[in-house]
Amino acid sequence: MHAHILQLNGRNIYVEEHGAPDGEPVAFLHHGLGSTRSWSGQAPAFAAAGYRVIAYDRWGYGRSDPRPNLDAPEFEADLQDLEALLEALHLERPALVGHSDGGTIALAHAARRPEAVSRLVVVAAHIYVEAKMIPGVEGVRLAFESERRFRQGLERLHGEKTEAVFHNWYHAWAQPRQLEWDMRPRLAPIACPLLVVQGEQDEHATPQHARDIAASVPGAQLWLEPGGRHMLPQEAPELFNRRVLQFMQGEAAGG
């Protein structure tokens, strides 16, 4: 593994690369409270399969520079950073794997730059705010305030930035105006193969959310995992890796 810092758009962004430098590139975008470490169950497996794996701490997270706020749901700063990252690493047409907020960013990038993405996997991504998501956000707030183990897990990822990471995420998604946001009309330009993944027991969204993403992009594959929850890549890494690698290799993401 090669770790380094890139300066993108005036901020220091922590980047990890795994696998052969000449392998087919795949970039991983972490979830709303995650970091590069969120992909520890995926990076070795994809590198072993011959891919050049790129994972990075988005601005404000992990070992990247602090951030004053999170501009969800549009994520314009994150989109600019992603484009700058791919340019700095000379990645013309990588595959993207995004989880939750990272999935939303990956979808937006593929819609804006359809020629620049070879394959796309989104896990528990958001394209609008469902009623179920509101109590889910509040449940995370309660866990952060009252569950020591939950807070300690975030501290391992973000260190002294933990409070800022959580409050940026919470204040972004708890805004009532988010109920008016809907990405569905913007997804049609996506031209690459797309795999939409969600656990059927996801505590933050219903399976209909994933169905709506898949229905917005012709030819998209849909994988709804029975019993799966929001953190499927971390909860079932072997299953996740196997099916996503099948998709990456041009096969149906079946059992």
Image (spheres, rainbow, N blue to C red):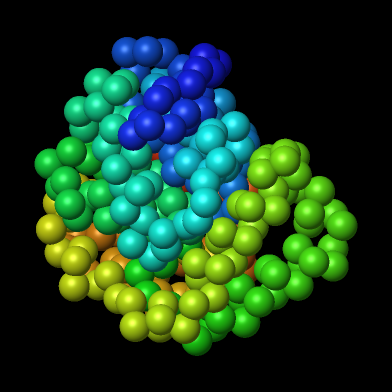
Residue 250 placement, left or right of 178 = left
Image quadrant assignment for residue 108: bottom left
Compared with 166, 85 (above or below) is above
The x, y position of residue 209, in whole percent, is 40, 75
Q: Is residue 138 visible?
A: yes
Nearer-the-camera pick, 253 or 204? 204
Q: Hey, which residue is sitting farthest bottom in the picture?
A: 131
Residue 235 placement, left or right of 99 = right
Q: How many marks?
A: 0
Compared with 212, 89 (above or below) is above
Q: Residue at x 34, y 39 (%)?
A: 81
Q: Residue at x 51, y 28 (%)?
A: 14
Q: Is residue 106 visible?
A: no
The N terminus - image quarter: top right
The x, y position of residue 184, in whole percent, is 25, 72
Q: Residue at x 18, y 38 (%)?
A: 116
The x, y position of residue 95, in whole percent, is 31, 37
The x, y position of residue 76, in whole percent, is 31, 53
Q: Residue at x 27, y 70 (%)?
A: 183
Residue 35 placement, left or right of 212 = right
Compared with 250, 194 (above or below) is below
